[in-house]
Image (cartoon, helix red, strand yellow):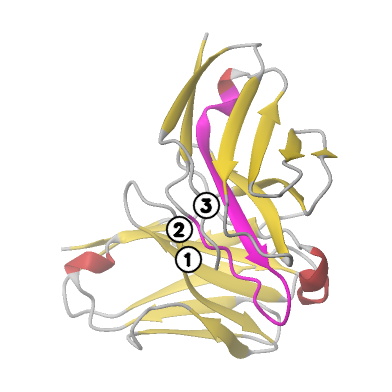
Amino acid sequence: DAGVTQSPTHLIKTRGQQVTLRCSPKSGHDTVSWYQQALGQGPQFIFQYYEEEERQRGNFPDRFSGHQFPNYSSELNVNALLLGDSALYLCASSLAFETSVGETQYFGPGTRLLVL
Amino acid sequence: DAKTTQPNSMESNEEEPVHLPCNHSTISGTDYIHWYRQLPSQGPEYVIHGLTSNVNNRMASLAIAEDRKSSTLILHRATLRDAAVYYCILRDLTGANSKLTFGKGITLSVRP
């Protein structure tokens, strides 16, 4: 059973460019969350998708947007890249119906983005 | 989300027990206590969670204070593979709030 997968593993972009990161959730999971992790910090919540809609959003500008597809996979898009967007971007999947009993989120290995 | 406070770092010897503390004095009645860990160059992974009672699983034990204002993650026999950043997280699971709010965590080093 494949866990959460993310692509690409590494990416280098320049300021002002746009980037798309991809995530496939763990088999059977229907909810995808995205996190940004700067060097030496804990992950910060960006947003969460369920039933192809953004359900919850963290304190990130609207340059950060996302999408969830009918097969539950998801994309994270970042426009007008800034140097400060350099970070590890993590995708986590979970089951929505378990939310009320403390469901586990399963994380992928992340995409390392470097903005020059 | 209620905040947690953890020491920055801790060292342990291999094959000895490790007690990782976490303070959460503003915890509410609907907050679950979750622990995740992040091994080097990997995404975080779930360790354990609890509400009021102590919990055990194959990875660790979670001891929760009677007033729930603190908890301790217990690794019974540390191995080199347990060297990681451990995050103590409170999750309010009422309504649709299921995001994880990470702090800086505690970095555990394990000496051979």
- Give the image quarter of residue A111: bottom left
Nearer to the camera, A27 or B51: B51
Residue that mark 1 sits on: A35
Question: In this image, B80 relative to B97: left or right?
Answer: left
Q: Residues within 10 Å of mark 3 (few under 14, many from 20)?
A: many
Percent position (x, y) of residue B107?
A: 45, 33
Percent position (x, y) of residue B98?
A: 66, 71
Stretch of the chain drawn in magenta: B81-102
Percent position (x, y) of residue A69?
A: 63, 85
Q: Residue at x 33, y 84 (%)?
A: A61
Distance of label 1 from label 3 (alpha carbons) = 19 Å
CB atoms of marks 1 and 2 within 8 Å: yes
Percent position (x, y) of residue B96?
A: 69, 81
Q: Residue at x 72, y 21 (%)?
A: B76
- Give the image quarter of residue A12: bottom left
Examine the rendered structure and indicate whether residue A39 appears above or below residue A51: above
Q: Residue at x 64, y 49 (%)?
A: B69
What is the secondary structure assignment of the residue under circle 3? loop
Distance of label 1 from label 2 (alpha carbons) = 6 Å
Residue B112, disc: none
Examine the rendered structure and indicate whether residue A44 appears above or below residue B108: below
Mark closest to the chain's N terminus, 1 or 2: 1
What is the secondary structure assignment of the residue under circle 1? strand
Q: Amino acid at mark 2?
A: Pro
On the same chain: label 2 and label 3? no
**Subunit bearing disc 3:** B
In the displayed image of the protein, which residue is found farthest to the top?
B112
Residue that mark 2 sits on: A43
Residue that mark 3 sits on: B4
Q: Amino acid at mark 3?
A: Thr
